[in-house]
Amino acid sequence: MDAKAVLQRYFDAFNAGDKAGMLAELSDDVAHHVNEGQVRVGKELFSAFCDHMDRCYRECLTDIVIFGSADGTRAAAEFTVNGEYLSTDEGLPEAAGQKYVLPAGSFMTLKDGKICRVTTYYNLADWIRQVSA
């Protein structure tokens, strides 16, 4: 199994705004480790997270570099998040269409050709600084 190809399809779907395409790359019991949040288990919760993100943010990932283990069970990507803050997210600064650019990374575990763990990291303090400026 080519873990890098799975991640490429996942990130291509993300950039296309294709939630169904992203979900197609996930296992039914995917564990989504949200930056600064709780672990959410299952495609339904992942889908709800995507809906929330789509309401509050418009993002495109650039400079994506994907890494994968030889056995196909682990992969990671480093990228730049180019975003716009569309609607105020609870507990965060007020949204007014602010633009932001953040380095970020995602780490994934794969089983049977599907992503079963997604962990994404970025610097929340940097994002807050950018949207509060």
Image: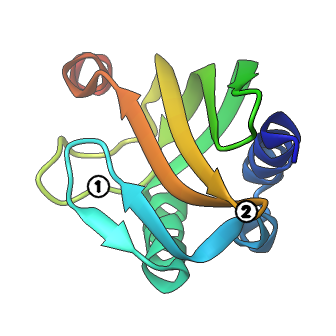
Q: Amino acid at mark 1?
A: Thr
Mark seen at residue 50: none
**Quarter of the rendering containing residue 73:** top right
The image position of residue 39, as x and y in percent, is 27, 62
* Quadrant of image for the C terminus: top left
Q: Earlier in the sequence, mark 1 or mark 2?
A: 2
Image position of 111 with respect to 52: above or below = above
Residue marked by disc 2: 22
Q: Residue furthest bottom?
A: 44
Residue 101 in sight here: no
Q: Picture coordinates of residue 43 (x, y %)? A: 54, 79
Q: Are marks 1 and 2 in contact (CB under 8 Å)?
A: no
Q: Nearer the viewer, residue 25 or 128?
A: 25
Residue at the image position 72 percent from the left and 27 percent from the top: 68
Q: Nearer the viewer, residue 23 or 57?
A: 23
Q: x%, y% of residue 92?
A: 17, 46
Give the side of residue 80 with respect to residue 68, left or right. Answer: left
Q: Which image quadrant for residue 66?
A: top right
Q: Which residue is at the front of the view, 79 or 55?
A: 79
Residue neighbourhood size for the residue with mark 2, other residues' Cα within 10 Å, grouped as few (<14), some (14–19), many (≥20): many
What amino acid type is highlighted by mark number 2?
A: Met
Badge 1 element = loop
Does residue 115 show up? Answer: yes
Circle 1 residue: 88
